[in-house]
Image (cartoon, rainbow, N blue to C red):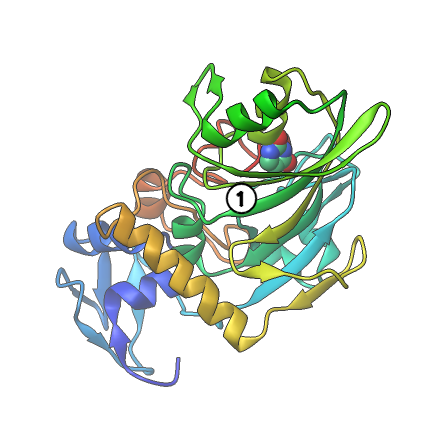
Amino acid sequence: MSQPMNLVVYLARAGLGSRRSCDELIRNGSVTVNDKVVTFPREKIDPEDVVLVDGEPVEARELRYFLVNKPRGVASTRRDPHAERVIVDLVPNGRILFPVGRLDVDTTGLIVLTNDGVLANRLMHPRYGVPKTYVARVRGKVSRRALGTLRQGVDLEDGLTSPAEVNLKKQSAKTALVEITIHEGRKRQVRRMFAAVGLPVEDLHRRRYGPIADKGLEPGGYRELAGDEVEALRRAGEEVAAAVGGEVEGPPVLLAAEAAPVPEAVRAAVPAVPAQGDPEPESEGAGSV
Ligand code: URA
């Protein structure tokens, strides 16, 4: 940290969760600054101040943002005892990063990794997430009726899907290529939508995540996001926050759980969950947001 900042921002930057959860940590008296309990979230913190949460030191870190083109077979989690590889291992020192959302283990394509917990929480909102564009190779003949249903909303077991943009790119004898943009992030949503209209997905690739696309990134490749891309993602995150009334609902992401000890108050208040909307943790590797 080079400049003074609000205590709540400092904690969020240290990877202790969303602003709301950091706000709660401060208000419930878990945070000291230079040995004094501070319960005012907007207290100004200077670079030389010593901040402890539940007696453990925290440090605001440099925020990093990477784009990865996930190959098939790699789990989009930080840990998975069943997977040969996990997404964070594709980036040097990736263990301090967190995947923003999920792709199924057999889905390929773009995924953002970051240690910015505030932004990640916003972007992963299951109902108001950023638009995500996929290309699906499906088995069968794509009828107008199927396209209409996919566009308007498919009745899935967890409710009607919200409107999607859908374009038939190519129809061959047995398969078709369909581009679909969804605005939600439910588990295996695209596969379930196509299955519901009688078109099983054979291959699924994410080609755009919100404002971020990159046709040139080879499978397994990664790059750091440029400043304007990070800004665009932040704006997208702000739109989500505005859509949900300023605060992102659901459990916050706890970042850097492996990089630094997690204070007891944080462990108790903030379970280290992956993405909102993903039911189960890191071993599963099958959710998608
Ligand atoms: N929808 C799916 O069905 N799978 C993914 O990996 C992403 C979106």
Q: Is residue 102 above or below residue 138?
A: below
Residue drawn at the location 47% of the way across and 62% of the way down = 233
Residue 94 seen: yes
Q: Please state which of residues 280 and 68 is positioned toward the viewer in this rendering.
A: 68
Q: What is the quadrant of residue 65 in the picture?
A: bottom right
Quadrant of image for the N terminus: bottom left
In the image, is 212 to the left or to the right of 36?
right
Q: Is residue 68 left or right of residue 4?
A: right
Residue furthest right as drawn: 173
For ligand 1, which image quadrant applies?
top right
Q: Residue at x 57, y 35 (%)?
A: 288
- Name the spot of residue 282 as percent of width and height, x first: 58, 35
The local crowd at label 1, few if under 14, some if 14 to 19, many if 20 or more residues have their Cα within 10 Å, is many
Q: Mark 1 belongs to which amino acid?
A: Gly
The vertical placement of 284 against 257, above or below, is above
Residue at the spot x=33%, y=56% of the render? 239
Could you tell me which residue is drawn at 28 percent across and 56 percent down?
Answer: 19
Reply above or below: 84 against 233. Answer: above
In this orientation, which residue lies closer to the viewer: 214 or 92?
A: 214
Q: Regarding mark 1 in the picture, which secondary structure is present there?
A: loop
Going by the image, does 151 lie left or right of 7? right
Question: What residue is shown with label 1?
Answer: 101
Pointer 1 residue Cβ closer than 8 Å to ligand 1:
no
Q: Nearer the viewer, residue 179 or 62?
A: 179
The tally of labels here is: 1
Q: Residue 183, percent across and down?
A: 46, 41
Residue 57 appearing in the image: no
Rendered location of residue 117, percent (x, y): 43, 56
Residue 50 vs residue 166, the one in the foreground: 166
Q: Position of residue 202 (x, y in %)?
A: 77, 27
